[in-house]
Image (cartoon, coloured by chain):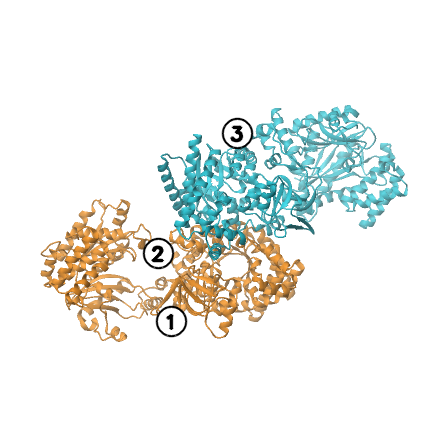
Chain colours: A cyan, B orange
Amino acid sequence: MTTQWVYNFGKDKNEGDASMRNLLGGKGSNLAEMAGLGLPVPPGFTITTEVCTAYYDNDKNYPDELAAQVEAALEQIESSMSAKFGDSENPLLVSVRSGARVSMPGMMDTVLNLGLNDATVEGLAKKSGDERFAWDSYRRFIQMYGDVVLGVDHHDFEDVIDTFKRNNDLRQDTDISADGWKEIVADYKTLVERETGKPFPDDAREQLWGAVNAVFDSWNVPRAVTYRRIHEISDKWGTAVNVQSMVFGNMGDDCATGVCFTRDPSTGDNYFYGEYLINAQGEDVVAGIRTPQSLTIKGREMEGSDLPSMEESMPAVFKQLDDVRHKLEKHYRDVQDLEFTVQKGQLFMLQTRAGKRTAKAALKIAVDMEKEGLITKDEALLRIEPQSLDQLLHPTLDPNAKKDILSKGLPASPGAASGKIVFTSDKAEEMAQAGEKVMLCRQETSPEDISGMHAAQGILTSRGGMTSHAAVVARGMGKPCVAGAGELHIDGKAKLIRVKGRELKEGDILTIDGATGEVMAGAVDTIKPELSGDFGTLMAWADKRRRMKVRANAETALDSKTARDFGAEGIGLCRTEHMFFEPTRIQNVREMIFATSEDKRRAALEKLLPEQRKDFAELFDIMSGLPVTVRLLDPPLHEFLPHGEEDTAQFAKAAGFSASDVEKRLNDLHESNPMLGHRGCRLGISFPEIYEMQARAIFEGALEASAKNNEAVVPEIMIPLVGTRKELEILRAKVEDIAKDVFAEKGKGLEYMVGTMIELPRAALTADEIAQSADFFSFGTNDLTQTTLGMSRDDAGNFLPEYIGQGIYERDPFASLDVDGVGQLVDIAQNKGRSVNADIKLGICGEHGGDPSSIAFCESVGLHYVSCSPYRVPIARLAAAQATIKAEEAPGKSEAAKKAA
Amino acid sequence: MTTQWVYNFGKDKNEGDASMRNLLGGKGSNLAEMAGLGLPVPPGFTITTEVCTAYYDNDKNYPDELAAQVEAALEQIESSMSAKFGDSENPLLVSVRSGARVSMPGMMDTVLNLGLNDATVEGLAKKSGDERFAWDSYRRFIQMYGDVVLGVDHHDFEDVIDTFKRNNDLRQDTDISADGWKEIVADYKTLVERETGKPFPDDAREQLWGAVNAVFDSWNVPRAVTYRRIHEISDKWGTAVNVQSMVFGNMGDDCATGVCFTRDPSTGDNYFYGEYLINAQGEDVVAGIRTPQSLTIKGREMEGSDLPSMEESMPAVFKQLDDVRHKLEKHYRDVQDLEFTVQKGQLFMLQTRAGKRTAKAALKIAVDMEKEGLITKDEALLRIEPQSLDQLLHPTLDPNAKKDILSKGLPASPGAASGKIVFTSDKAEEMAQAGEKVMLCRQETSPEDISGMHAAQGILTSRGGMTSHAAVVARGMGKPCVAGAGELHIDGKAKLIRVKGRELKEGDILTIDGATGEVMAGAVDTIKPELSGDFGTLMAWADKRRRMKVRANAETALDSKTARDFGAEGIGLCRTEHMFFEPTRIQNVREMIFATSEDKRRAALEKLLPEQRKDFAELFDIMSGLPVTVRLLDPPLHEFLPHGEEDTAQFAKAAGFSASDVEKRLNDLHESNPMLGHRGCRLGISFPEIYEMQARAIFEGALEASAKNNEAVVPEIMIPLVGTRKELEILRAKVEDIAKDVFAEKGKGLEYMVGTMIELPRAALTADEIAQSADFFSFGTNDLTQTTLGMSRDDAGNFLPEYIGQGIYERDPFASLDVDGVGQLVDIAQNKGRSVNADIKLGICGEHGGDPSSIAFCESVGLHYVSCSPYRVPIARLAAAQATIKAEEAPGKSEAAKKAA
């Protein structure tokens, strides 16, 4: 059997429908669907996406049968329209449009009026009774075809018109007569021949194939290729080509063209939203020469416009269009984005597709449609892009504001903010206390900058990736952050930022958009977030639906409260070291590190104990009734040491050390690769007294909070960087000893768990050993990504953009879990872990815990919870619900989830 | 059925044999074996190792049946010896000795004369007709028992004797009469009661059980536990206890005691080697109060001694002993270490075991025994510890020389050397050129120190582990190196080494032993290595037997020649970056790095090309006919940058850069974790022109060498640090393009391969993808260990000793492959790799390639070759042969090896 490469649509012969999107593309399949519903669709045909694939597989040759099938389809249109393609008396004109499976900018868009030449233009003039319209259509065709098919710069065409108007002393295009357009057509042809070396194609079929080739060729232009890579669209999908008989919105005042949405795409309100222009072709709406008019009276009134709405000017056709609106929304069960043309009072539908909408609108539409009974709760949940909730939680830039963009970094933490440039944490605090809004700008941040980050409106760094310190902490705080803006030379010493020849100094105002990564000079207006009741409704549905719990990564009281307000069901990662940096404590921490004997170290730790206990008591109080995972000290000790001469001297003096002692110790603690150094449980093995102090603070704090609330927390004590079962065994025993001591001293006990982070490949590979000594695993996918890929997140900025550019990694593996590599280890670990310990509790606490596609992976391997920064909790709740729904839709895929259930 | 916990040995009832070593321990099973052979073994019994296990499993309680079984076994001895345990008329005396499966220092050794008390001593006096002998035996018993069973300090006993001699004006023990010993016995008892709070046990059975308990308890003393951990002896094995009737070598001049070897354990020469003492108990030989005499006339003559040999003084007994010697060596088919006692002219055998021997002796004995038909070639091969060959290849310290040991570091590269302390590479070269022997002492070395390391006799560092730069390079050069000697404070600025309060300055002489890690002040005599014909014989057998090929890691002409001389069958790892550090090139390399555009970079590379081509041509010439794996540039670029102000200024001037340009670039290239940074193939992706230059140099060099030798090399071009198939695809295509270009230019081609190092967990996990684009995998287990364990080899020195001390890792995972973790990834990778590419060539080029137990692992997963530093090639050849033999002995274990065959 011969392959069918061409499918007709229209009322007389309609071969496709909406289910054939992969074959016919989005546009083609929806045109057929509309025709099938009996809506007025100008007849046409679709050349399938398979032709595109065949074209590229065969060195840009078409399948043998294609030409004949196109001819047959063309004949069908001719018969429906009672006109003939290329006929000088009664010419059929067509449009040619691309149409891939998903909408894709960059490809050839549209050629209208195809089929016109010096002979057929006369036929069109006669048929329409309007010579000026015919020649205007002809010149529009040459201009569009010349631009998108033949590659002649569209400015050159505009120059021809401008010259003509100047020479003839005319002001507007509407002043040009039929003869004027004739003259311009001649000039256009001269222009095309000069630019391309060939005369403009006269033959209608040559024109048609030229346009079809151009569509297929545009599939592989760089912009389209880039777009596909970013959006994970396969190169193999290909595009379809739609050839459709022309209808004209510009044949007089009983003609019009317009675009509309079945609901307001900006607010989600359920009214008919759209614009139209009388006596115009589609491109006129886009070109912005004439101001489009509102479709409805309501719309006109809202805009305060005097121009008549279509509801008023063409009431009958409007009624017809409004019927189409209801029919299509009910049929597609979603907001539709429509294009239509009215030709001599007759309505034609040219496109329908799902309408793009703002996050706010998406939320309202989903909740409304569920209430209207149009969609189910599951469908409503699946309609919202989880990431888009960020727009509802953080300030965003006013889309109408002017932006002086300096550079672009990584969109590290969402939200937009402006502030005066400061280069140090101290300065940030000082100015913030004086009531100034500041923007903390640093090469990279370290734990010492926490207070400055708190004080600042936003954080900008020139180094580091999506999981750099600045990015992680900013997300935790819900503050905007642009990280790794490498074009910026941030010179803290000179208090200058240099970028592309410009210089900004301390005190200058800067704006960042953490959702796009844009860095702008000056202040840019922002819009405050607001949470509607719809948000609460949808979140409640999500909570009912999802299998996985959602926890937050938090250690401060503020973050924990935020997390609980956002619906966190516990803490998945409390990084105790963040508590060590408070100015009142850091001296004690440093003295502990400098202690030359266990006794002295214990003495310094003794001073830290009450502070840590207070921290935990407060945290457990806030999280009362929920589990809290506390990670024991993790970073290498040198992170806590003084930096710079002044700081060092100050510390040495306060602690009573000589400068050379301090220098020697600093030197001893220096590491070549601190990420792989003396940190995590290795510290616990070397200096067990540190972990003992922390365990004591946890148990004492937990008992204190439990007594206060009469409701217990369940501390889950997490040993970091475990690579062998033995490490966990040794340290677990120490924690259990402390628990026994504390419980005996206080005369009461509580439930607790001891587990480990899985963040080293060796831990994942030997999880069947480690799980025998662990009550839980928490996948620390930040470090697991670093070790599995051998890639430092702090240094990857030098090559990762290139890597993503060349498609070596599809997405930043620190932002979205590398399923093939890191994911494989997570899967190995959960399988091996469960094989020896069926009840082991499994969660993820890396940054991936807040990334929807990573959350879907976590569902597929049956984790019990995900944990993410507080502001991502709503995103994770929705993403987890979607993951549950999708897993049920694809049964069998989630064996692990069944085990977890 | 009741478990048999006790086994008799001796001519009347002999229940064991040598095959029961696990149950009866080494000593017990060999005593039974000797008795079974009809040799004169004093009767006794063995309490099995299972009793030890039961003892610990049951809270230090013995199995119920034990007491009765011991009684029965005791009765058997009583009957054989016609004497009665604890009987005052005719007392049976026994010795009690420990005896584990393998010999293990730290445990309780021996109690002799057990059964003596105030009553039985009179019986012994009567029976022996020698009262002095009886009381001397009694006091010896109290002293031994008091020391090893009751824990009384043996010095306290000696003090009693000294006081007695002083009070009675006696000079030697032999001057003490029977009455004197009686008095001492009384004082001994007083001492014991004072020290232990209890009287010395009088009852023979109480004495016996006390000794048995002491043996079992000594299984878990710290020293024994440590020994087991180091030697990978399971805690579960337990020790046996041997109770044996006493025979006396100290009852007169017709008595003697001695130890002997069936061949010379130092040279391997086939003559009867040993010492004896007339009228003495075993401990006298050890105590060193009397000088032992040689066993044979030949021995006496070799030593130039006047003291009569046993061959002369007791010819009949000697003849009998010599018969035993031949009988046992033939029976055990190995050199035996024997203990004997002669009591009143009658020979008794007290022990036989395999004799410890030097590397040289082991080699000679193995080859000799094969010639004698005593053992097979396979057995000969298995008799040699591969590591021990190091002693034959490197200078060793004279064992008789005095050593002033300052500290101990890691035994990083074998061999011993002395030299004057220098702190910089430049100084090392300068002094070496002036004819001085120097010792390069640094905190750590970097590639810039190569020339200084070449100039030095040895290298000493205070930082870094077994695979630190210093260690790896020194092994490659065959130079002694002690690394990570953390107690030493090496202060290059002050030109001082401080250690334990002592100071050494530049020019002071230092000696290091790279086989033990010892660092000594002053010069210590060394012994030069010599290779005998036996070495060649054994190596030839090994080469015939092994399945895996052995290659070397080398890049210089010198190293490559050494490697080929040592039998390397190709280069497994040529690290091209080592070639970049030569003074003539480093300027060009730096200019390449500083180039601000591709053009400038290409210009700098153009200057490097002829140098690299020369390198490769030379290397390929030396390795003519063999495969050579060349790794393209791997380390992060900042390794090549100038260090220190002077160097930086010099470079900037020569290259025409401003100081601030240089500083900015240095800053840009700084990395937090260079190990996980912009290196390996990431450089190739970012700067393809570097790899293109290297590929060109390789192909041009290979064609040049092939033309010269009329024998081709097969260059195997290795892309480092691959984590995804795509990286390899992109870079492979570039290499292939260069190959095409070069072959076209030169008008001839050659065979080559393109493959990758597997050194990232992700690469191993996705090996089924990567293998589709790779001709070979070389496991880079140094980096794979770093990433899998999340452990920087440069920083691990801070905690790894503690880790090994606590048994978290059995051995340094950088020296011996971590089979459970890293090995699992190697196995996953070879399986996945072969699943898509059955012919893929697999090798290992990490430091583990020279470690025998790692080599055994490589055999088990079917690698095709191992590659190691040149001086380890012989070790690897032998280890590979042993691995093949052992794999055949344990069939089914090595499925992978079958695939590889």
Name the residue carrying label 3: A544
Q: Residues within 10 Å of mark 3 (few under 14, many from 20)?
A: few
x%, y% of residue A273?
Answer: 71, 29
Along the line of sight, which residue is nearer the eye, B363 or A596?
A: A596
The quarter holding residue B340 reads bottom left
Name the residue carrying label 1: B525
Q: Mark 1 near mark 3, Cβ–Cβ under 8 Å? A: no
As shown in the figure, which amino acid type bears the numbered disc 1?
A: Asp
As shown in the figure, which amino acid type bears the numbered disc 2?
A: His
Along the line of sight, which residue is nearer the eye, A265 or B625?
A: A265
Q: Are marks 2 and 3 on the same chain?
A: no
Along the line of sight, which residue is nearer the eye, A95 or A107?
A: A107
A328 over A498 or under it: above or below: above
Along the line of sight, which residue is nearer the eye, B662 or A841?
A: B662
Q: Quadrant of the N terminus of chain B?
A: top left
As shown in the figure, which amino acid type bears the numbered disc 3?
A: Lys
The answer for which chain carries disc 3 is A
Q: Secondary structure at mark 3?
A: helix
Q: Residues within 10 Å of mark 2 (few under 14, many from 20)?
A: few
Task: Give the side of residue B365 with respect to residue A255, left or right.
Answer: left
Q: CA distance from mark 1 to mark 3?
A: 81 Å
The answer for which chain carries disc 2 is B
Disc ID at residue B231: 2
The quarter holding residue B283 reads bottom left
x%, y% of residue A742?
Answer: 37, 39
